Image: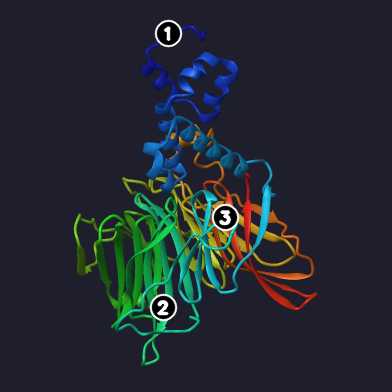
Amino acid sequence: MSANVVFPFDVWESIAAHMSVRSVLNLRCTCRNLYDMMGESRGIWHQILEDIIGINPAPDTSRRIATMSAAELRSRAIVALRMHNLWSSSSTEIVPKRTVCLPCPMDIARAEIGSGGHWILTQHFDNSLKLWNSSMTEPPLAVIVPPSLKGAPIREPIPSYMGLLLTASDEGQLALTVDRHTHPEAKLFPVYRVYHIDDLNNSIRLLTTFWRPDRYCRYAIDRDLVVTAWTSDDAFFVSIRKIFTKAPYFEEHTLRFGPEVLIEYVPIVSLLCPHVLTLLTPSKLMHYNIPKFGHGTAVRPSESVPSALAVYDVDVSDTTSFRWRSPSCQHCHDGRSNVITYSDRPVCTVLPPPQDEDASVIRFDMGTRLARGLLRMLWHEPGGDLLHFHSFIHSTRAPDHPGYMRLSTSEAANIGRTTTIVADVSRTQSTLLVRDLSWDECTGKICALMSTYTTWDRADYDSIVLIDLLD
């Protein structure tokens, strides 16, 4: 087509809706005049990036997309294409572009890397949170020490278990922490706190604090939803709490299950998306709709359990016969989803799409240190002088989703494929222990909290290793 053909811009915009990122960028070489019209258009890049986010979820980008310039939108789309090309290359082994080992304080319990890899959040044994730049330069950008809890159980000096999870929602970055307190009757209670991380103003704000009466409480956070599950009086409870950063309240639904789900062990609860949760028992896999939330303060009483979307039998003796399917969520889940189970090692089971009767379940055995992204799983494989990480896709959309066209790929392109990342931290005669693992899957930045024992001076060192797959 001649570059001099004159069409209204909406015609070019309609044509661009069927072009991949690479095709639009190639116009710079094949038809510069057309690229100046299409390739510099904010509206075209906005639609391209929205399509990509549909298959590669990026809540932080979704939150900022309305205010991004054409150059910023194009840059994010190019990074997504580069990440896709990296994962789908002919080699199943990736050597990082850059690996940096940063000394860190010895009292760090957990560490998470923020969106874009521009900052790091650490949880310390005194339960404080500290926000750092990506170089861990002293002093930290922000520090918060939560207030003591009135009437709560006594906190252990160094809790036997602490947890930190970071997520991005439409209202900003949220962090969920957990540590254990001891009741005077020697019972352990987990205490949860949710914080808002303002990376633009370098501040941390405590939003809510609560605790549960069960030491084996399970928990998760995804976008603006916090899920906790616990047992009490022969019943099993699941709480779904919606967090607001711009209003002084939250909303909560608490579902009460009967003792039949407590056979053998406490069920595993997974938040598949903001609309569907899964309950896994030794004999059943059950999908449930998450109750709708209103727009006001509401700590709702325990509710009867809604009817399950689907119930599948679990046959652990023959995993190849699993007929599990992903739930059909009209909002965001028309492809594959997953559940994680734990035995000797964590196992991720990727469920087939809801309408595909011929697709099979795919299972991955993982290491104990893992980081679950919205699209990909990452875990560390211990052993040897090098750091080995593995990654695979655990969530997809319907095959006809336009995001696959934008990246010139298909829904089934990389399902079942595991990619290995090999990083050299250049420490000879040492034992490497990864204590915590997180990553920003959109930009390929990995953060590993490590303890290193060196044989030459018989000493332990803590460090944070930052791994950049793209640089």
The amino acid sitting under disc 2 is: Tyr
Q: Position of residue 288 (x, y in %)?
A: 31, 59
Residue drawn 34% across the image and 51% down it? 171
Q: What residue is disc 1 on?
A: 6
Hey, which residue is sitting farthest bottom in the picture?
Answer: 185
Reply above or below: 32 against 313. Answer: above
Total numbered labels placed on residues in the image: 3
Choose mark 2 or mark 1, whichever is in front.
Answer: 1
- Residue 325: tell me if it is visible: no
Reply above or below: 300 against 335. Answer: below
Q: Say whether disc 2 or disc 1 marks the residue closer to the N-terminus.
A: 1
Residue drawn 60% across the image and 73% down it? 106
Q: What residue is disc 2 on?
A: 216
The amino acid sitting under disc 3 is: Ser
Q: Say whether disc 2 or disc 3 marks the residue closer to the N-terminus.
A: 3
Q: Residues within 10 Å of mark 1 (few under 14, many from 20)?
A: few
Viewer-proximal residue among 160 and 51: 160
Cα gap from disc 2 to disc 3, whole angstroms? 34 Å
Element type where label 1 sits in the image: loop
- Marker disc for residue 322: none
Q: Say whether disc 3 or disc 1 marks the residue closer to the N-terminus.
A: 1
Element type where label 3 sits in the image: loop
Cα gap from disc 2 to disc 1, whole angstroms? 67 Å
Choose mark 2 or mark 3, whichever is in front.
Answer: 3
